[in-house]
Image (cartoon, grey):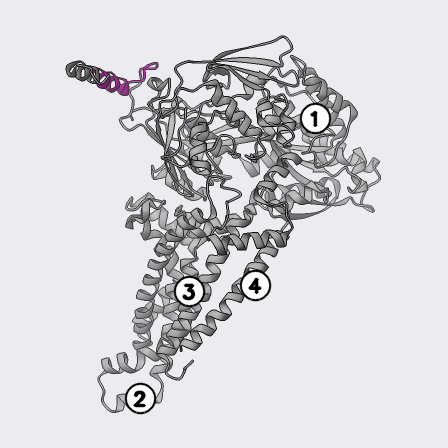
Amino acid sequence: MINYIIKRIGIAIPTLLILIAVSFYLMHAAPGGPFTSERPLPAQVLANIEAKYGLDQPIWRQMINYLWGVITEFDFGPSYKYHDRTVNEIIGHGFPITLKYGFWSFIVAVGVGIPLGAIAAIRKNTWIDYLAVGVSIGAQVLPNFVMAPLLIIVFTLWLDWLPGGGWNGGAWQYLVMPVIALSTSYMASIARITRSSMLEVLNTNYIRTARSKGLPTKVIFFRHVLKPSLLPVISYLGPAFVGLITGSVLIDIYFSTGGMGYFFVNAAFNRDYSVMMGITIVVGSLTILFSLIADLLYAWIDPKIRY
Amino acid sequence: MNYLPKSLATGFLLAIFASSSVMAATHPVTGETLADDQTFTYSLLDEFTSVDPQIVEDVSGSDIVRDLFEGLMNQDADGNLVPGVATGYTTNDAKDVYTFTLRDNAMWSDGNPVTAHDFVYAWRRLADPATASPYSWFAEIMALENVGAVMSGDASPETLGVTALDNHTLEVRLTSSLPYFAAMTTHSSTFPTPEWRVRTFGNDWTKPGNIVSNGAYVLTEHIPNERSVRERNSMYWNDDATILEKVVALVINDENVDFTRYLANELDKGTVPSGQFIRLKQDYPDEATSFPRLCNYYMTFNLSDSGPEIFKDVRVRQALAYALDRSVITEKILQAGQINAFTFTPGATAGFEVPPVAFGQMSQADREAKAQELLTDAGYGPGNPLSFEYIYNTSEGHKKIAIAAQQMWKEVLGAEVTLANQEWKTFLKTRGSQDFELARGAWCGDYNEASTFLDLLTTPSGYNDGKFSNAEVDSLMLDARTMDDASANYTRVEEILANEMPVIPVYHYAGVFMLKTNVKGWPYNNVEQNWYSRNLYKVAK
């Protein structure tokens, strides 16, 4: 197991470096730069700015300088667009926000999705099953860019229960709508995966054997059905968790949460190279980390898998 | 002060308290009853780039900077020039030396006096290549002595043509005569900067807590992409006249959410979602506002060597311009008070009378008949249809206009037009490198004078992406710079443009917003929409 973890980390570093190099190249391949605008800057002004940020150097040198700053000083550089802030500040501000609403969305998606799927599977072809399937399909087809404005109209404009947006340090009133909007489709997927995988397990011979031996339903469910049914769910949860905590641009746009997702997308449009790279590195590292964690969890649950 | 008798001090405080509470009750000039809560909340579509006067480059950032800092001159509600930190100025006959007299009671929010040295520092900082300001070109158009050499690093910033003769006298030397120089000092990049704070905190000097400012407000909170708060600056020289206590700017990236939150009373000023102005004007006649803006929307032909041969024929350019039914675009598509354009310069521009260019005087039916005639003369017809590509930057609004234009050209002229959209920066690159046939363009004036538009179509202009070049236009615009009244030149240039048709003027912009009826003092008549929170107030409902 330890050897496996070391091996995975050994692979992770070159993977990350390749990711950085490819992103860096792609980013610079896009036409225009951070200072391209409707009114082109006079040559001297542009030259001064490029000199200040080192953009006048060849791309390979810019990349090495950038990486050197990241590795030696953990410095992701200045933002080219938001002149008053550094990338460290932008990520340091945006990531905790995204992490918070992403984490709660994950809890809600798992906490509601798995029971919903399980109930549907156990009460197959009853009204409970139809209701649960109906709810999860409904949630799946209602994308969050439709749901977010609807939530605001209902909870802010009509009922006047919740503020229409903002973050306010993550107070719960500001967290409710982002979490609902973000978790719904994940919850729906989790419910559907749980249901189908549980139905499969319920039809296996060893469950039938357990039943014929007269084991109580509760014992069968918790001891023999739940764990194997969750295997496909866990392989879904790894990437889902990373997706949730690395930011949703739509949540940031509709709820003005100030999270990392919007900065990331906006950085691409602004050609704000350093912000784009910084967030790419953070998201890339997290993706690698959580896919490793998901694999380890998998091995823990499934005795057939041993690393 | 420390030895002030206690009773006197108490009495003094009571007097201040009493007078301020009376002032909070009614407006000192109009006598209206004021609301208890003087907090003004408005929305921004996007996070602003900076609140550093010499760095900020966007409109929403400049709006904030105008509250935090005060320059030599200000604008009033009608856009007229009024004193700011300077009480006035004198100039020589050649209008290339200006001497500003600064008021002696202007203070920074930390209690330091605002002096001429603060302006000298700020203007040097603007031009200094080490600052690398994206707005340093403003120092260049201010024609400050030595600005070119300073910006290229060949001369030190100390050689710039701005000197503090004493604490309250600022002398500015220019390389050419600029009759409108004083008006340029209302621009945020000319506002003073507290050198001692910049030196202490470096790039972090604009953060709340570090920032010291000389305007009516100080920045007390800034959470990127969420909100920023500015509160009344008690050290401001004219603080007694300020009524709004607090101004909150919320970043709301989606215009529909913005509007919902306005309806939910979370905002005092909000956005009108595109295409909904007419409906909102009916439902909220006192809140939905449309006003002319100093911006134009046009289509530019590529007249450079890399451009298509078809557009070298002036008849083709005219035919396309004539065949475009502008009312369909302004009245059916945009519906927010935009104005049909037949000239490049918007009619709202100060001192600019829209000249009666011939094609603007015709009816649309006549224009279309004339367009068909012109195109037939140019040798195009059913057997040989005109065909070209129109590019625009990706946006729902531009797409609708492009499709409408495509359809009009098809119906009237039988032209085969293909449409292509490109992501913003890609589009700018394509257009800037003359890699197009017909492209969308738009321009907003830097200052309220026709040359800010017409200079764009001169040969040396860096923004002339269609590469139109006309010797008469160039010389008329060059002469206009030193004339006291250049309106005749501008009229003549517009007439040349209507004949040569290097660009198709489509419409002149209108700005729209929602403003609660209890917010008073909005400068509707200031076409540049330079608003100052200290002139706003909320009345009791």
**Is circle 3 on the same chain as circle 2?**
yes
Helix, strand or loop at disc 3? helix
Mark 4 and mark 3 in contact? Answer it, CB < 8 Å.
no
**Is circle 1 on the same chain as circle 4?**
no
Residue A201 location (% of width, % of height): 35, 82
Q: Which mark is residue A18?
A: 4
Look at 29% across and 76% down and name the residue there. A123
**Badge 3 is on which residue?**
A240
Give the letter of the chain under mark 4.
A
Helix, strand or loop at disc 4? helix
**Badge 1 is on which residue?**
B362
Q: Amino acid at mark 2?
A: Arg
Q: Residues within 10 Å of mark 4 (few under 14, many from 20)?
A: few
**Is circle 3 on the same chain as circle 1?**
no
Foreground label between 3 and 2: 3
Foreground label between 2 and 4: 4
First to last magenta residue range: B15-31
Helix, strand or loop at disc 2? helix
Image quadrant for the C terminus of chain B? top left
Q: Residues within 10 Å of mark 2 (few under 14, many from 20)?
A: some
The residues bearing labels 3 and 1 have C-alpha atoms spaced at a distance of 62 Å
- For marks 3 and 2 on the same chain, the one whose residue lies earlier in the sequence: 2
